[in-house]
Image (cartoon, grey):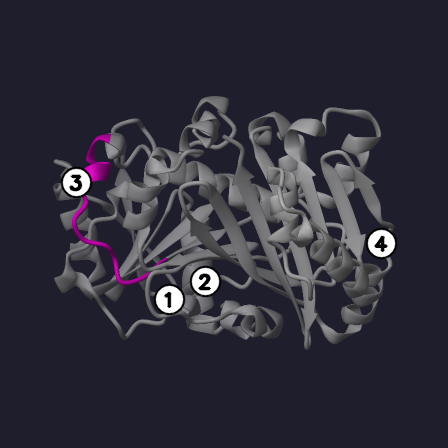
């Protein structure tokens, strides 16, 4: 469970970098408001991405100063592009998008890979007609093979590269996946009421949003060191992008049986203060450190990252990724950083990683910031 959030975020960042969402072209007339997409998402999902504006990701991310740096994910071969066989010319159409979608979800499933995902669209009318129009806009005309599962039709589209895509469509919705078995899980979730809506911890974490949002939900702790003995936690991450920084904000929710151990751990971490690395636990220590940083007339970028954190935080962690090159620094960083970040430190050398956690009621609020070093 520890590495799932990192893997999911990395897939999302990869998709952003190469414009995977650019094939999603819904006109304003296609907007639907009646279908509850969450009721389709299987209970076994390990993560969920929800957005009303994939165009923002496709158009804005390439313009950021760190976009090229993260574009090395495309060359790494670690995460193949979701649905690239359906619309192989996505990059060439990314800047021609004129309309966003009203709501889209992507669920992630074990074992984690870019193929084990399901994409959900809310449409105004027939989901099948929506899919056919979407393909026709790319100059593709396929006659699907029809299969039946529990009285519902699954359309199987053969792609030009020899692969297949499975689709489950109806009035107001369209669900796509490379894996027919995942589409069957979607049908089970809907017919048997065993969707993520039945997960009490997830629903406490879930926040329905109205406009202009990108939110990732992971069935894992926000930071791996916090939870090592509780498999039922969920974390939310609102994804924010600007020219110099991208950051994730949200909260982690746990069952009552796990909260005491996590709270105890949060306030009893050992302090670390080295060149390019800072770990502080306890609100008083955090307040004292940040207040001192703010009082300094001239800041380094690292000090500025520290001073931008909240003095009310229960825990803060800041690391200059370029200085985590080995030895004790790398060992300490590896304890606090998400697993994916540590496994690919070279990819994040140009960033300062900052994180804060604050206990707010029964939730643990977090902000994770990647600041690009010019």
Q: What element carries label 2?
A: loop
Are the residues at dot 2 and dot 1 in contact (C-beta closer than 8 Å)? yes
Q: Is mark 1 on a helix, strand or loop?
A: helix
- Nearer the N terminus, badge 2 or badge 3? 2
In the picture, the disc for residue 41 is 2
| Residue in the picture at 36% in, 71% down | 36
Are the residues at dot 1 and dot 4 in contact (C-beta closer than 8 Å)? no
- Quarter of image, res 27: bottom left
Residue with the mark numbered 4: 269
C-alpha gap between disc 3 and disc 1: 27 Å
Residue 129: x, y in percent? 16, 56
- Nearer the N terminus, badge 1 or badge 4? 1
The residue stretch that appears in magenta:
92-104
Nearest the eye: 283 or 349: 283
- Look at the picture and state if 128 lies above or below 92: below
Residue 368 visible to an observer of this rendering: yes
Residue with the mark numbered 1: 37
Q: Is mark 3 on a helix, strand or loop?
A: helix
| Residue in the picture at 62% in, 29% down | 344
- Quarter of image, res 348: top right
- Look at the picture and state if 252 lies above or below 368: below
**Foreground disc of the pair 4, 2:** 4
Specify few, some or many for label 2: CA neighbours under 10 Å numbering under 14, 14-19, or 20 or more.
many
């Amino acid at each position: 469970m520890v590495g799932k959030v990192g893997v999911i975020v990395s897939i999302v960042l990869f998709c952003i970098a190469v414009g995977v969402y650019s094939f999603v072209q819904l006109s304003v007339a296609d907007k639907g408001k009646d279908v509850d997409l969450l009721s389709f998402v299987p209970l076994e999902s390990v993560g969920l991405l929800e957005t009303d504006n994939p165009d923002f990701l496709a158009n804005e991310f390439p313009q950021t100063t760190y976009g090229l740096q993260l574009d090395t994910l495309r060359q790494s071969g670690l995460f193949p592009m979701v649905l690239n066989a359906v619309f192989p010319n996505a990059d060439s159409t990314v800047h021609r998008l004129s309309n966003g979608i009203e709501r889209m979800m992507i669920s992630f499933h074990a074992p984690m890979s870019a193929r084990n995902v399901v994409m959900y669209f809310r449409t105004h009318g027939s989901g099948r007609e929506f899919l056919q129009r979407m393909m026709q806009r790319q100059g593709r005309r396929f006659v699907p093979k029809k299969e039946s599962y529990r009285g519902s039709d699954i359309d199987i589209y053969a792609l030009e590269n020899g692969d297949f895509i499975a689709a489950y469509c109806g009035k107001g919705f369209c669900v796509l996946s490379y894996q027919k078995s995942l589409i069957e899980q979607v049908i089970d979730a809907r017919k048997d009421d065993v969707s993520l809506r039945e997960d009490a911890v997830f629903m406490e974490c879930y926040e329905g949003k109205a406009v202009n949002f990108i939110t990732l939900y992971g069935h894992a702790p926000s930071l791996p060191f916090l939870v090592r003995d509780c498999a039922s936690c969920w974390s939310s991450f609102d994804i924010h992008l600007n020219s110099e920084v991208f950051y994730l904000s949200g909260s982690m929710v746990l069952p009552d049986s796990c909260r005491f151990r996590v709270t105890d751990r949060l306030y009893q971490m050992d302090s670390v203060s080295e060149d390019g690395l800072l770990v502080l636990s306890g609100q008083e220590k955090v307040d004292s450190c940040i207040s001192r940083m703010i009082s300094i007339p001239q800041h380094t970028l690292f000090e500025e990252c520290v001073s931008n954190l909240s003095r009310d935080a229960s825990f803060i962690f800041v690391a200059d990724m370029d200085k985590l090159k080995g030895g004790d620094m790398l060992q300490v960083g590896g304890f606090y950083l998400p697993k994916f970040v540590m496994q690919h430190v070279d990819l994040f050398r140009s960033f300062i990683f900052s994180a804060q956690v604050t206990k707010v009621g029964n939730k643990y609020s977090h902000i994770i910031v990647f600041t690009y070093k010019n």
